[in-house]
Amino acid sequence: LSERLSGVFDKLTKQGALSDEDVKTALREVRVALLEADVSLPVARDFIKAIQDKATGQAVTKSVTPGQQVVKIVHDELVHVLAGDEEDPGALKIDNPPTPILMVGLQGSGKTTTTGKLAKRLTEKNGKRVLMASLDIYRPAAMQQLAVLGTQIGVDTLPIVAGETAVQIAKRAKQQATLGGYDVYMLDTAGRLQIDQTLMQEVEDVRDAVNPRETLLVVDGLTGQVAVEVAEEFDGKIGISGVVLTRMDGDGRGGAALSMRAVTGKPIKFVGLGEKMDALEEFHPERIAGRILGMGDIVSLVEKAQETIEAEKAERMMKRFQKGQFNMNDLKMQLDQMLKMGGMEGIMGMMPGAGKMAKQAEKAGLDDSILRRQIALINSMTKKERANPQILQASRKKRIAKGAGLEVSELNKLMKQHRQMSDMMKKMGKGGMLKKAMAGMF
Ligand code: GDP
Ligand code: MG
């Protein structure tokens, strides 16, 4: 992705503002990136459309670079969609004990493992007493698996009784949890390799028997498109309260997260990051957003591009200064830079050769508001006046000051400062000090 985008952003960084065409070009690449990250087609399409509307609305905003602006909009929107409105996505509703939590999903998605991980978390982190029960009547080994996990993490499991139905086990779990004074009981259901009617009916019956407070869909984060279908199906039939994405320790791009969130509107609560019992994390939208976009790459790329541009600009400026050319445009660029670098305070001490000027500025009470006023004054000069400030006569001065809403005396001060700096540049240019001073500024 970063390779493909770099070409686009190279182009973008050379232009001043974000045009419709820029947005379209960049978004074509973002769309490919989304599809490569396994985001489903309709979701990617909607997402791009939302971005397009937002980006175009912001098209006039003056940004550092247009590319950066697009990346930021895309990233923010990704985070926004992924995060939804939940304040604390990892929070589970645990109120009236014993609170039932139903774990659903396809076989092999990581239900049993996640049941153990969550039970451990609820026990250790939330201080809850948890009872786990396996409803996988089709695979005795699956029941045994949960019992083993329970022993390993120190969480009780419902004793295994042969010949019961899933609903019978669920009811027994509820009874045992009530009698045993447990805060939570977790039901680990059986899965199928594919969604089928028998499975759905069974899960529905269990749901109706215990009325779960949380129904968590466990999905393999590597399955992309399939995950979305699974989520739609389970949410439609059973009604889920949240999603756990497993296998996010793999090299999947995490596009399934975006698709599922967009399609079901249900929060992603946790992310599985390995086979071990502590490999479970609360969902962090920024991390997944970064993963989907390869954001780190893009950001550093854009930053690098920017640095190059700044360095080139500085180089050009220095050449001119050494020849004794220092006009109002140059001064304005420096003032802009000063503001960007944290104003006068940030700049003090950074210019070894300009120590005297810095002290003067300090004495004169030169602060950021003065920087801004000076920039305003330069802005209200014509192109010709900026290039040759010596042509400024009384009438022109009055016009400029008025245009900036300031007094002529301020303009005179600015011009004096410009002359002093210009002289200093010449001297420094000869002594090689200029290079040092500029190095501090850029
Ligand atoms: P179930 O059939 O849905 O109950 O799936 P299991 O919990 O038995 O998990 C199937 C396999 O996936 C097991 O080998 C687990 O160790 C593994 N697994 C589960 N969650 C994760 C995860 O987050 N990361 C990795 N790498 N493996 C996982
Ligand atoms: Mg299982």
Image (cartoon, rainbow, N blue to C red):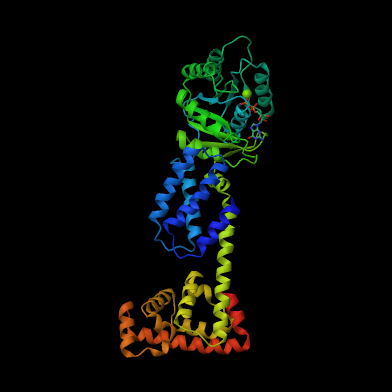
Residue 434, image x, y percentages: 59, 83
Q: Is residue 429 left or right of residue 361?
A: right
Left or right of 181? Residue 370 is left
Residue 220 falls left or right of residue 331? right
Query: Residue 435 falls in which quadrant of the image?
Result: bottom right
Q: Position of residue 401 (x, y in %)?
A: 33, 82
Query: 255 or 153, which is in the foreground?
Result: 255
Out of 401 and 357, give the one closest to the viewer. 401
Instruction: Look at 51% across and 86% down and name the residue there.
Output: 325
In this picture, is 359 found above or below 286?
Answer: below
Specify whether residue 442 is in view: no
Residue toward you, 21 or 37: 21
Q: Position of residue 233 (x, y in %)?
A: 49, 26
Q: Is residue 275 left or right of residue 311?
A: right
Name the residue nearer the viewer: 82 or 62: 62
Q: Where in the figure is residue 168, as x and y percent of width and height?
A: 54, 12
Q: Quadrant of ligand 2?
A: top right
Q: Residue at x 40, y 83 (%)?
A: 384
Residue placed at 52% from the left, 90% from the top?
423
Q: Which image quadrant for residue 381?
A: bottom left
Looking at the image, the residue that sits furthest to the top is 163
Q: Is residue 229 above or below residue 427?
A: above
Q: How many marks?
A: 0
The quarter of the picture where the C terminus appears is: bottom right
Note whether residue 107 is visible. Answer: yes
